[in-house]
């Protein structure tokens, strides 16, 4: 927050500018707002409470976050997005096949990122079954992913990103989830999604998780999307990445063949495992 704010702004103007800062930065601290607007922290808290009462932001400990990143779409997401437990048995054999191929791409001594979700968990399970792997460092935002990898410790070092727990997928999201991703450079990231195709790119049904997936891609040298064939040529609400920003798609034979060819034409490597 380097921009100097005019002093003695009318309260309504100040709150509008605070709302803009929350929207652009995802999370803001009370202390930073007090310094930026040259007002007391008591006044900041009052402003944030008014914005929260108007359902424009969400108050969290020490500051505020975008309501649209979690609460505003929560009811829609719960209707459209199945929970982890509801998804675990759907296309289980396809996900296992994707997981085993994905795990075959990993080498001893590498650092990798694994996303949340049932397909990502299948990748984690397949990695634990590779007894030849040693000194693997795994970063994940998924609690279920981390628990699946636990049996491979101490061969693997498993690091959770931290953040706010989202129960539906047992995932860690903003605020605070992305800070560790800004400090690492992994060899490869394995990313799940709800849709992938051209020109829509890689998309997800949940905005907070989509934000973390994007950060994962930025933190890795290579990105492998793991998605069964039902996700191909589908589009969800939140953009994760353009097709040109990812390197490899592992999918299954139910995928739309024309959509796969279109993505291959953009330089995406595609593997169909079954």
Image (cartoon, rainbow, N blue to C red):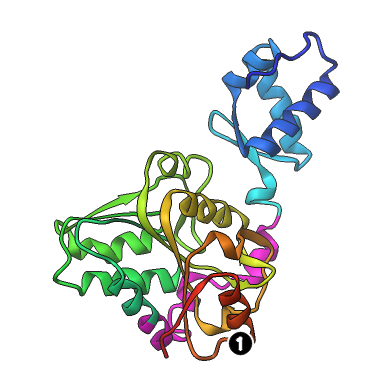
> In the displayed structure, does residue 134 sit left or right of residue 273?
left
* Count of numbered circles on the image: 1
- Residue 269, horizontal then vertical, whole percent: 48, 74
Magenta range is 73-97
The quadrant of the image that shows the C terminus is: bottom left
- Residue 56, horizontal then vertical, whole percent: 75, 41
| Dot 1 crowding, Cα within 10 Å, few <14, some 14–19, many 20+ | some
Q: From this viewpoint, is residue 229 visible?
A: yes
Residue 266 among those drawn in magenta = no
- Residue for badge 1: 256
- Residue 22, horizontal then vertical, whole percent: 67, 34
Does the magenta stretch mainly form a helix, a strand or a loop? helix
Q: Nearer the viewer, residue 145 or 179?
A: 179
With respect to residue 256, does 149 lie above or below? above
> In the displayed structure, does residue 181 sit left or right of residue 61?
left
Residue 83 among those drawn in magenta = yes
Q: Quadrant of residue 117?
A: bottom left
- At mark 1, the secondary structure is loop
Q: Quadrant of residue 134?
A: bottom left
- Residue 236, horizontal then vertical, whole percent: 67, 68
Q: Nearer the viewer, residue 110 or 265?
A: 265
């Amino acid at each position: 927050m380097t921009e100097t704010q005019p002093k003695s702004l009318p309260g309504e103007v100040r709150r509008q500018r605070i709302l803009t800062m929350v929207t652009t930065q995802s999370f803001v601290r009370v202390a930073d707002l007090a310094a930026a607007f040259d007002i007391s922290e008591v006044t900041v808290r009052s402003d944030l409470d008014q914005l929260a009462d108007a359902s424009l932001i969400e108050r969290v400990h020490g500051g505020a976050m975008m309501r649209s990143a979690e609460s505003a779409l929560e009811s829609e997401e719960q209707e459209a997005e199945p929970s982890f437990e509801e998804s675990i048995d759907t296309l289980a054999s396809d996900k296992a096949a994707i997981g085993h191929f994905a795990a075959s791409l990993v080498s001893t001594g590498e650092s990798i990122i694994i996303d949340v979700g049932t397909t990502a968990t299948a990748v984690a399970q397949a990695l634990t079954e590779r007894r030849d792997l040693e000194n693997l460092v795994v970063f994940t935002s998924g609690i279920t992913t981390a628990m699946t990898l636990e049996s491979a410790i101490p061969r693997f070092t498993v690091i959770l990103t931290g953040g706010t727990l989202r129960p539906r997928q047992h995932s860690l999201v903003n605020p605070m989830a992305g800070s560790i991703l800004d400090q690492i450079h992994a060899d490869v990231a394995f990313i799940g999604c709800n849709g992938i195709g051209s020109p829509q790119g890689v998309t997800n049904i949940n905005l907070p998780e989509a934000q973390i997936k994007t950060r994962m891609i930025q933190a890795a040298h290579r990105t492998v999307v793991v998605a069964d064939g039902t996700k191909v040529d589908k589009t969800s609400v939140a953009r994760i990445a353009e097709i040109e920003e990812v390197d490899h798609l592992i999918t299954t034979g139910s995928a739309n063949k024309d959509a796969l060819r279109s993505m291959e034409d953009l330089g995406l490597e595609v593997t169909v495992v079954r």
